[in-house]
Image (cartoon, coloured by chain):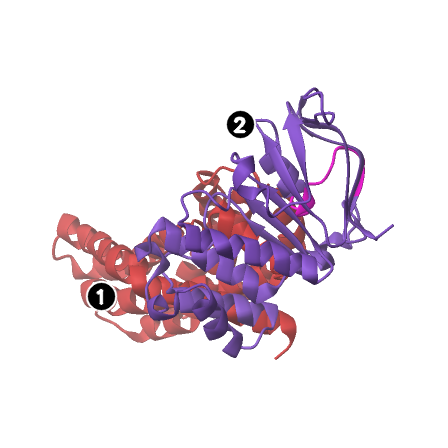
Chain colours: A purple, B red
Amino acid sequence: MPEAVIDLRAVGVRLGDTPILRNLHLRVAAGEAIGLIGANGSGKTTLLRLLATLLAPTDGEGAVLGVSLRSPERFAVRPRIGLIGHTPGLYPQLTLEENLAFIARIAGISAAAVHEVLDGVGLGLARHRRAAACSHGMQRRGEFARVMLTRPDLLLLDEAHAGLDPQAAELVAHLVNGARRRGGAAVVVSHEPGRISPLVDRFVELQAGAIAEPGTGRP
Amino acid sequence: MTGLWRQAWEVARKDLRTELRTGEVLMITVPFGAAALMLIPLAIGVDAPLLERVGPGMYWSVVLLFGVLVTVRQSAADGPAQMDLLTLLGLDPAARFAGRAGASTLLLLVFEAVLAPIALALYGNDPRGWWWVLAVLPLVALGLGLLGTLAGAIAASVASTTLVPLIVVPLSVPMLLAAAQVTEGIRVGATIFGWLLLLVVMDLLLAVAGVLSARPLQEATR
């Protein structure tokens, strides 16, 4: 069996007394991509943040990229994780190029790669435009460029398709396939399963913070 | 340059570039600070000895109160998405603290330096004491920069930005007192060593507290 990039065993997350995620068992192998679906408030974003090590489990045990979600070693594994959330993480007052150059310098990546990825996502001519002046679609492309720059082994996409034209949507496939080729894994959240089904190997559905049993639609 | 200092430099550079684009400190806070300095002479009138006596205190009060605005601007610069980005990039939280505090310190130093000649013109006929104020400027700017950055991180960890002034103002009172006493001590010929030492010790304590608490505060900000 291939090594698991994600391995959750009875994991739960509570906010105070309120359970947000419950008894999650999930294993995602190296080279695999899964689609994560579920209604609003079902816990999809919380699960992505847990997998990104930005949240610690309050119950159960889990590991990503071979590192426990509770261990201090999770700090070291973070640069191998790429997260694109609902809100763009670009700095609005910096240009697209400055944003990526900042990220590259922090991550110790060559400056030449910045131009390459900006051209790769079709933002080469807009590189001197401030992020605040970019449309939603351009900011999304900027986020894709950021992920292409850092080449994560675990890719987490939260509604990355939302509001994108077909050409930009192809970039999502490029990112997912890139993570798979590197021996990593991808988790793609979407409200449109049909749109991401060509990208993923299987779907996992969340209902009220728990994984629905396949075929039953019940947690 | 080590990894930590290189990362801190990048964070500071990014913050300063953002300030150059928005002009929040130079175009908004500085003019309001200057206006505040002018209010007291307008209220007192042309009483030169009195103005000279209250000048240092007024200057440092304005630096403290408006300096809080500078640090609030800094602490509000990163939204949750940017925080996640920096965390996942593997940015050392201590480097983030150092970079942000460094940028704040530089902005506060500029703020102090712009206001100092205005205060001298409005309050001080005798510049002897004021020359020594220049020596205190970096110590106070550093202290306020460290304190504001630390307070911003604490406030972010409990999701309440209104905490920043509540933390900064009382903890900066010893700095204000020391800075004013150094200025007054020089003017009347009293010893100032103890007050200078207080400023240095406060800066050191804030730096150590900020670096040591950076990781726990970052992890608490979720």
- The type of residue carrying mark 2 is Asn
Pick the front one: A158 or A35: A35
Q: Magenta span has B147?
A: no
The percent position of residue A218, horizontal first and vertical second, equals 70, 19
Position of residue B20 relative to residue A201, above or below, is below
* Residue numbers of the magenta segment: A51-62
Helix, strand or loop status at disc 1: helix
Pick the front one: B68 or A164: A164
Relative side of A15 to B119, left or right: right
| Circles 1 and 2 in contact, beta carbons < 8 Å | no
Residue A76 in which image quadrant: bottom right
Pick the front one: A95 or A31: A31
The percent position of residue B159, horizontal first and vertical second, equals 52, 38
- The type of residue carrying mark 1 is Ile
Q: Is residue B91 visible?
A: yes
User: Residue at horizontal 18%, vertical 55%?
Assistant: B38
Name the chain under label 1.
B
Q: Is residue B77 visible?
A: no
**What's the mark number on residue A7?**
none
Pick the front one: B166 or A7: A7
